[in-house]
Amino acid sequence: MGAVILPLMGIYLTLLIVGTAYGWRWAKRRGYSTVKRALCAFGGFLIVYLPLMWDWIPTELAHRYYCKKEAGLWIYKTLDQWKAENPGVFETLVYNKDRPFKVYYDDETGSKSVNFLNERINYTTEGKRVFSFLPLRKEMLEVIDAKNDEVLARYIDFGYGSPLAFGIMPKIWMDRSFCEDTGHLDKPFFDFEESFEGAKK
C-alpha cells in the first residue's frame, strides 16, 4: 500500500505547488498588486487542496473539541457500593462464558449492541457519527444493571479512521482512534466491567 500511496502523495504535493504558482503568475500577468497575487495564489492552492483535504482540519478541530468537552470515564457506583445495595446478589451471579449479545442496529449511521455478562449485569457499546459530513465517531461503553437500567459506569471516546479519497485511496493522514488525554481510560473501564462478571463456571 505504501508503495502506491507515497508516489501519489508526491504527485499531490507537486500539484499543490503548481496550482499555487499558477495562481500567482496568472495574477501577475494581469498586473495585479502583490496582495491580489497572493490571494490568487491561495485560490490556486485551494483548488487543488480542497477536493482531497477539505475534511482534515474540520475533523481534527472537532476531535479536539469533543475530546475536551465530552470524553472521559465515569464510575457512578463501585462494586462495593452495588453489593451494599444488593446484599447477597453478587454471590449468585454466574458469568455467561459464551458472551451472548444482541444488536440493536448496525448501519451507516452507527451501531449499538449489548452483551449479557450475567443475569443481572449488561455491557453496552454504541458508536455513531458526530456529523454526517465528517468521519468523526463517538464511542460510548456502559456497564448497566439490567434490573433497573441503572448505568454503573460510562466511558466515552472519540476517534476517526482513514476515509477514502474519491472512493479509492485511504486518507492515511486522518487516523486518530482515540482521544489523547483519555484513551488510556479504556483499561480501567474494562477492569470495572470484569469485576461485575460473576463466578466463572
Image (cartoon, rainbow, N blue to C red):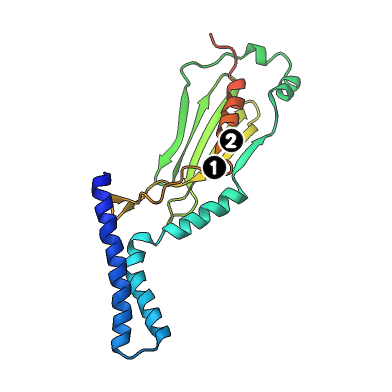
**Is residue 96 positioned above or below 63 on the image?**
above
Q: Nearer the viewer, residue 90 or 68?
A: 68
User: Which percent across, then down, holds residue 16?
Assistant: 31, 67
Residue drawn at point x = 48 percent, y = 21 percent:
99
User: Which percent across, then down, holds residue 68?
Assistant: 60, 50
Residue drawn at point x = 51 percent, y = 30 percent:
114
Residue drawn at point x = 54 percent, y = 21 percent:
117
Residue drawn at point x = 70 percent, y = 30 percent:
77
- Which quadrant holds residue 42? bottom left
Q: Secondary structure at mark 1?
A: strand
**Is residue 147 positioned above or below 95 on the image?**
below
The amino acid at mark 1 is: Asp
Q: Nearer the viewer, residue 181 or 114?
A: 181
User: Which percent across, then down, holds residue 22?
Assistant: 28, 77
User: Which percent across, then down, holds residue 53?
Assistant: 37, 60
Q: Which mark is residue 157?
A: 1
**The furthest residue to the right:** 84
Q: Earlier in the sequence, mark 1 or mark 2?
A: 1
- Which quadrant holds residue 46? bottom left
Can residue 196 be seen in the rendering of this structure?
no
Q: Which mark is residue 167?
A: none
Q: Residues within 10 Å of mark 2 (few under 14, many from 20)?
A: some
Q: Are marks 1 and 2 in contact (CB under 8 Å)?
A: yes
Q: Which mark is residue 185?
A: 2
Can residue 99 be seen in the rendering of this structure?
yes
In the image, taking residue 175 as reference, residue 181 lies left or right, namely right
The amino acid at mark 2 is: Leu
